[in-house]
Image (tube, rainbow, N blue to C red):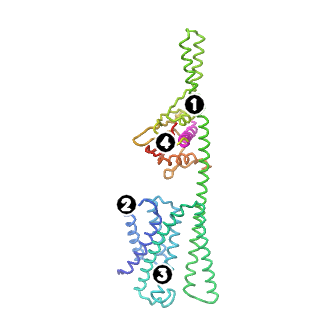
Amino acid sequence: MLNPINDMLLILSIFIPMIILESILTYNKDTDRSKKISFFILLLLNYIIVKIIILFSVGKFYEYNIIYILTFIIWGAYYNYFYTLGIIKYIVSFFLFDVYHSLIRDIISRSLFFIVTGNVISSKEALLISNYDYAKVEIYTYIIIISIYMIAYLTFRILNNKLQLYEDNKINYIYLSIALMVNLLTIVIIYINKKIERFGGYSELYVVGYIVTPKLILASSLFIIVLFIKIIRENRIQSQNEIIKNKLDMQYSHYLSVKESHMKVKKLYHDINNHIYCIENLKNNNREINEYVNSLKNEIKEFKSIYNTGNIILDIIINEKSDICIKKGIKFICDINFSKVNFIKPIDVSSIFANILDNAIEACDKIHDENINRYIRIKGTISKCYFVLKCENSKVNSLKFNKNILLTEKKDKFIHGIGIQSIKSSIQKYDGELLFEDEKNKFTITIYIPLNQNTDSWGF
């Protein structure tokens, strides 16, 4: 038999918590029309499933647990698919929200029940209260919950803007203080309940205390665990950034030290080449002079700049990595036009190209089968409004990816993930994009950097 009041309360009990949770989990995230439509379709599906379970109820305990588990799974799949929300983050967020929502709801509904009916919900008189009064309490409860959420949402937006001015460590201390205050409140509630119990008292405050206390403890414990995980992650990122900065500084210092010598060698090559040309014009087919000139030519061949990209730092890097490839027997093919990309700072040029080529050389170095061609092919061109860099290298090792994040195979993942992180850190400064393409025998890394940069020229 249809009961409009019960149906309305069921809709409120499903829709309002899920709408509030959705606004929390998708805060500051892109929410397009298709996601909104999918969200409300799932809400309707959630309602239908709950309605069917209630109609074929096998007992309140089993009914509640089945509904809870199914709701958890449905929304977990939704947030993972549309917002790529990790399972751990979703579990913690879902349970924290459930604890705080049910806690607030219990306190409000019990208080309103007394205000509306004049009786406490745990008393015998409450059994005589009409369904209409129960429905009125539930509706008022959700109205207050929505009001509290709106106030909390506006307060959070204001405080969040102010908190962003603080350092991460200070923000963590603020969050930790809140968690400790909740624990202190829990201790106070337990103390009051013990006093009531000692004097043989039994009141709504006593009942609420035993409902509130375990939920506060659970919520506070989860909050502290999440906070410590956040602190550990931030410290890890900070340490990683320090290593990246130190590595970049060392790389850049190295290439700056080579730069002056490189310029002198280029000038010396030019001068000696002119001298040899003059000697050749003056010689009279003397065999000894011919041999001497030829030996001089051979001596200075290695000083000739093979690559000319339009950026002196990049020339040094390419020539250095090319020499390494020659020594290791790796075929090196390079074609880069960097003349229009002079907005990239030299330290970032060093970070991007040195790390890409180091990783490619390392991958080729793992190939021990002589029948497999060891090669590195790097090309940089201007395509429309982008500088496109593509580096392809042969490989034999298998690579692992997680959402376009390359996972290192090495035991010390923290240290050996620095190369890729360094590249990402550099290209993000210029709104660039990094893509990976992994095939059986080759690996390709592609970088797109927009050319319309409002940056001072850093070209050499």
Q: What is the crowding at mark 1: few (fewer than 14 residues within 10 Å), some, or many (at least 20)?
A: few
Where is residue 45 shown, x and y percent of the image?
Answer: 39, 68
Where is residue 420 shown, x and y percent of the image?
Answer: 54, 46
The numbered mark at residue 34 is: 2
Q: Distance between the residues labelled 3 and 4?
A: 62 Å
Q: Mark 3 points at which residue?
A: 109
Q: What residue type is labelled 4?
A: Phe
Q: Quadrant of residue 49?
A: bottom left
Residue 33 against residue 198 in the figure, above or below: above
SS for callout 2: helix
Q: Give the range drawn in magenta.
A: 347-368
Q: Which amino acid does label 1 sit on?
A: Met
Q: Mark 1 points at which residue?
A: 263
Q: Mark 4 points at which residue?
A: 343
Q: How far apart are marks 2 and 3 (CA)?
A: 35 Å
67 vs 211, nearest the viewer: 211
143 vs 460, nearest the viewer: 460
Q: What is the crowding at mark 2: few (fewer than 14 residues within 10 Å), some, or many (at least 20)?
A: few
Where is residue 211 shown, x and y percent of the image?
Answer: 55, 79
